[in-house]
Image (spheres, grey):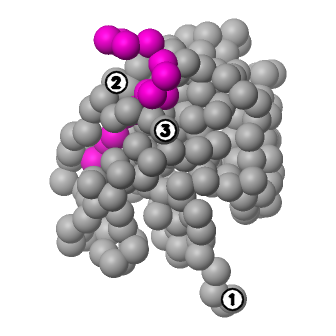
Amino acid sequence: MHDDHHHHHQFRYNEEERLKRQDPVKILKSSGLMAGMTFIDLGSNAGFFTLPAAKIVGPNGQVYAVDVDEQAIETLNQKLAALGTTKFGTVVGKAEDTVFGAGLADFVFLGTVLHDFADPLQVLKNAKTMLKSSGKLVNLDWRKKETVIGPPLDIRFSKAKSKELIEAAGMHVTSLKNYDNNYYLIEAVPEDGPVGH
């Protein structure tokens, strides 16, 4: 297998197993995703979070996703169409090179992928560009400790490292908490966004 930096393709877990550990609907709803919102998934893979997000935002919402894996995006397109989602845009490519539009999104999501990007700071800067001033970035990531599953410890980002990157991209971290034994969740808003949200 050729070696590239997209580690997450070595971790193709069984979806059902993953659903037991990560409840995408619960994670997204508890982070504030609601009907009518515009949702962007960076490093979406085949849509583990994009598809539940499409159901949550509903017919008046919009969904965008980018992933380097062409097969994953093809699968995602088929599944979104099957859901009846009409307002969606997907891109096969690097999140570093992808901006769907400025001030477009209510919600930009990263699901255990931040450490996979060649240039995570650029990805986060793009996220900030795409966020409305009232929008929110949500980063779900692996805790930097030994867990039964997940990527090698040395490639994981600690909470502090993720926070540092998010702040360097011009966002303000509003919430940082352990989600459970395996994951932590960071929420952030654009620095020039509304205060006291």
**Which label number is shown at residue 170?**
3
Span colored in magenta: 184-197
Q: Amino acid at mark 1?
A: His
Asked which quadrant contains residue 6, the reply is: bottom right
Task: Residue 186: say if magenta.
Answer: yes
Relative to 67, 138 lies left or right = left
Q: Quadrant of the C terminus?
A: top left
Query: Which residue in the rendered view is the most extreme toward the bottom?
Result: 1
Amino acid type at mark 2: Ser
Lower sequence index among marks 2 and 3: 2
Q: Residue 41: x and y, percent?
A: 60, 40
- Specify whether residue 167 is painted magenta: no
Percent of width and height locating residue 61: 66, 15
Q: Position of residue 78 (x, y in %)?
A: 79, 41
Which of the marked residues, 2 or 1, is nearer the chain's N terminus?
Answer: 1
Residue indicated by mark 1: 2
Q: Residues within 10 Å of mark 1 (few under 14, many from 20)?
A: few
For mark 3, does the 10 Å Cα neighbourhood hold few (<14), some (14 to 19), or many (20 or more) residues? some
Does residue 52 appear left or right of residue 38 in this picture?
left
Please identify, in this view, whether the residue under mark 2 or under mark 3 is nearer the observer: 3
Give the mark nearest the N terminus, 1 or 3: 1
Please tell me whether residue 105 is drawn above or below residue 99 in the rendered image.
Answer: above
Q: Nearer the viewer, residue 161 or 186?
A: 161
Which residue was labeled with disc 2?
A: 30
Q: Secondary structure at mark 3?
A: loop
The quarter of the displayed image where residue 191 is located: top left
State if disc 1 and disc 2 touch (CB < 8 Å).
no
